[in-house]
Each structure stands twice: as structure tokens, then as C-alpha cells.
């Protein structure tokens, strides 16, 4: 899924939630400070409760819709200052599984503590919890809306 690379890679999992937007800001700042590339990744799949038995979704249509959503989120987070070192990627599949796979090539993965699904009272969402347990690289799970600390040299 991911290409081999020589420079560091930071991957940000994005689902459009406020938590993932804050995580994307952290990931971009960390990537800039460390000279890394940044992949902003959004995963999608057709839930069986939506599709039902025998339903065949228009996959190309859904993929394009998610690309639009991800680009809108990136534009809202960065405005006209979209990082030149960032690649925007939309992948079909389970978010946790795709990010765990991405962790094999990444130096750091950054996700929000909770996304659009699950229960609001949980400290970790299912994706961030699975990622923390199974990723092949360090995982930063962003809680709240704090900004990344400034680095002074």
C-alpha cells in the first residue's frame, strides 16, 4: 500500500472529526520540524448495515466522495497554507487495519483519540486503541485541542 522511502514519514489518520483535525495539525507540525513527509489518510468502507445483502455499491463514486471530503478537511485545517510535503490518500477498507498496515512504512502515526463512531464517553476510539496495540511504529494519540509545543534552538 505504501511506497518505500528514504526520508521520514508521518501518517495522519483523518476522519473529519474535530479530534482528527487537531491530530492532522500536530502531524503536519511534527513532520515539518523533523523534515518528514506527511500522508493524510482517510479510510472508507460500505458498512453491511447500510448495504444489506446483495447490495453492490458504486465504489468509484464513494471513493470520489471521500476524496472530496478529505480535501475539504485539509483545506479547513490549512487553508491556503497546505503543506507541500503532504500527500492526501483515500483508501478503501477498515481504518484500523489500513493504518496498522501504513505503520510498517511510517516513522510515526498520529490520530485523534475519538472519531465519528463509538461512544462519546470513551477515552479512546476503536481505531486509536487498535492502532496503539498493533502498530509497527510509534503512535501519537491526540487528546483535546492543545497545540504542538514550539521547539527553541
Image (cartoon, rainbow, N blue to C red):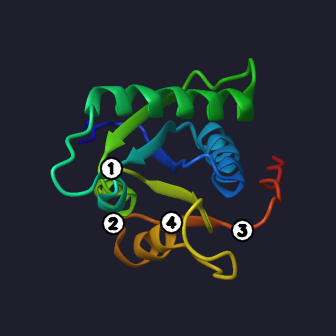
Nearer the N terminus, badge 1 or badge 4? 1
Point out the frontmost of discs 4 and 3. Answer: 3
Label 3: which residue? 143
Q: Which mark is residue 1?
A: none
The crowding category of the residue bearing disc 3, from other C-alpha atoms within 10 Å (few below 14, some 14 to 19, many at least 20), is some
| Gap in angstroms between the C-alphas marked 3 and 1 | 28 Å
The crowding category of the residue bearing disc 1, from other C-alpha atoms within 10 Å (few below 14, some 14 to 19, many at least 20), is some
Label 4: which residue? 139
| Gap in angstroms between the C-alphas marked 4 and 2 | 9 Å
Label 2: which residue? 136
Q: Are marks 3 and 1 in contact (CB under 8 Å)?
A: no
Residue 121 sits in quarter:
bottom right
Point out the frontmost of discs 1 and 4. Answer: 1
| Gap in angstroms between the C-alphas marked 1 and 2 | 27 Å
Nearer the N terminus, badge 3 or badge 2? 2
Nearer the N terminus, badge 1 or badge 2? 1
The crowding category of the residue bearing disc 2, from other C-alpha atoms within 10 Å (few below 14, some 14 to 19, many at least 20), is some
| Gap in angstroms between the C-alphas marked 1 and 4 | 26 Å
Label 1: which residue? 46
Nearer the N terminus, badge 3 or badge 1? 1
Amino acid at each position: 500500500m505504501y511506497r518505500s522511502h528514504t526520508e521520514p514519514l508521518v501518517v495522519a489518520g483523518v476522519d473529519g472529526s474535530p479530534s482528527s483535525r487537531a491530530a492532522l495539525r500536530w502531524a503536519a507540525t511534527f513532520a515539518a520540524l523533523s523534515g518528514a513527509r506527511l500522508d493524510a489518510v482517510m479510510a472508507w468502507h460500505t458498512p453491511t448495515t447500510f448495504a444489506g445483502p446483495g447490495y453492490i455499491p458504486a465504489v468509484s463514486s464513494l471513493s470520489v466522495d471521500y476524496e472530496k471530503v478529505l480535501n475539504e478537511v485539509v483545506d479547513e485545517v490549512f487553508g491556503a497554507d497546505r503543506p507541500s510535503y503532504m500527500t492526501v490518500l483515500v483508501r478503501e477498507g477498515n481504518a484500523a487495519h489500513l493504518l496498522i498496515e501504513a505503520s510498517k512504512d511510517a516513522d510515526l502515526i498520529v490520530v485523534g483519540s475519538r472519531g465519528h463512531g463509538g461512544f462519546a464517553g470513551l477515552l479512546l476510539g476503536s481505531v486509536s486503541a487498535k492502532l496503539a496495540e498493533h502498530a509497527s511504529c510509534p503512535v501519537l494519540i491526540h487528546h483535546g485541542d492543545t497545540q504542538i509545543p514550539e521547539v527553541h534552538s
